[in-house]
Image (cartoon, helix red, strand yellow):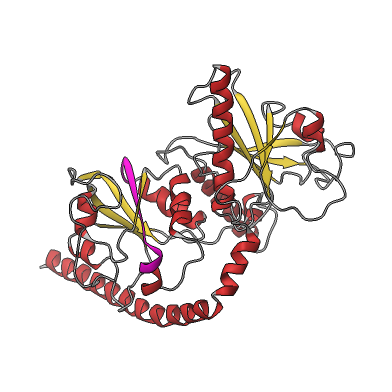
Amino acid sequence: MSDPAVETAPEPGEWPVDPQQGIEISKARIWIDGCFDFSHHGHAGAMLQARRLGKELLVGVHSDQEILENKGPTVMTLEERVSAVDACRWSTRSIPHAPYVTSLPWISHYGCHYVVHGDDITSDSGGEDCYRFVKNAGRFLVVKRTSGISTTDLFLSGNEGPGSPEERSNAGMEMSQRIKDYASDETGRQPGALVYSWDESNSSGQTNSTAIPGSCKILVDGVHPQPGQRLVYVDGGFDLFSSGHIEFLRQVIKAEEALGRSRGWYEETSVHLRRIPGEGNDYGPAYLIYISCVVFSAPFTPSKTYLNNLPFGTPHAVYHGPTAFMPLTYDPYAAAKDLGIYRQIGNHDFQHVNAGEIVQRILRSRQLYEERQEKKGEKGAGEEAVRRREQMEEDAAMLEKERAVNR
């Protein structure tokens, strides 16, 4: 492990990714870094805010060893964490093996002027602020952390949920704005993914013959498919969203690209992937580059009625991956097979990364995780002290400024 008190940089030719030679520093090129373990909407929210501050966003991803030495064991490997960062549409590129203590030589080498981080304190194994070097250089920008989000909150009309009518209304408006932000394009400023909610009185129908008619209610408007553009549907619970889900989505895109090339009509914009998650405690990653449209509250069984009433009509293909299903007495994809649009994705490198695998990883490292949580508690006290000190310094500077004006 390198000395966190000293800023170091790789030798020419030894940088983890190109360029090997430093490039011109630009204020429009932003750096953000982190562990990105169990990459979720909070990470995406930070990347969105950082992307809006510039035209490019470089994302540094710490190595497994650096995280272990400074914070504790990771659940996901570096390769898995990088795949999650690369899948986020606001990430211009990932930089693996970024130092845990953000280094000026590193960010300068990749042409970044500013480093962005949330308004919390992150410390290294010695309890020192990980961003002390860039802060001292005046190259640090703060964004707000993303607070807790639940899918239920997304559909608050202002008449549901806890709190006063005013509180419920405010919560509904806040969540509506957040999902609109998360559905934005790669700049984070323009419309991107479409977002719908499926409205059906009983969405748990187990066969394609018992489905009750429903309709899609639009929540966020975005970029619509072009006439003749191929429409692709996938679904799932997407619980403990991970590299297994991301790689499945990427494989769907690859399959569609291969099909298009084989038939001579492939273009970069010809694949319109429709991602339809079940309900959970997250937005569903509308921020992924593989996603063009999200439909919340999708039924477990995509019936003919449901498929025929999706936005823009019946999809050209329904894909499913090599995931383990709970024992069922029926085929959830019977309707898609009857329509002749069912497609199967084969094995891939991350197919083993599912909820069961993740739980097993945690159980195998239980002692390490307990030590990690204890260490985080100790570090949290130190980080709070640093936060109070910085606030006192800011207050003192403001007071001195006011005194100077009044002299």
Q: Check the picture and name the quadrant holding the C terminus.
A: bottom left
Q: Which of the pair 226/179 is nearer the observer?
A: 226
Residue 142 lies left or right of residue 260; in this view the side is left
Q: Establish if 264 lies above or below 138.
A: above
- Which residue is painted at 43% across and 73% down in the image? 72
Q: Residue 137, how many percent across, how many down?
A: 17, 61
Q: Is-magenta flag for residue 119?
A: no
- Which residue is painted at 68% across and 59% down in the image? 161
Question: Does residue 221 appear anywhere in the picture?
Answer: no
Q: Which of the pair 29/352 is nearer the observer?
A: 352
Residue 75 lies left or right of residue 378; in this view the side is right
* Quarter holding residue 241: bottom right
Q: Residue 82, how many percent across, how many down?
A: 43, 52
Q: Residue furthest right?
A: 210
Q: Check the picture and name the quadrant holding the N terminus.
A: bottom left
Residue 95 lies left or right of residue 325; in this view the side is left
Q: Which of the pair 337/274 is nearer the observer?
A: 337
Question: Does residue 96 appear anywhere in the picture?
Answer: yes
Q: Residue 183, how many percent across, how many down?
A: 52, 41
* Quarter holding residue 406: bottom left
Q: Is-magenta flag for residue 59?
A: yes
- In the image, the segment drawn in magenta is 53-66
- Which residue is painted at 43% across and 58% down in the image? 78
Q: Residue 351, how many percent across, how many down?
A: 60, 51
Q: Residue furthest left?
A: 407
Circle count: 0
- Which residue is painted at 67% across and 63% down in the image? 162
Q: Establish if 14 lies above or below 365.
A: above
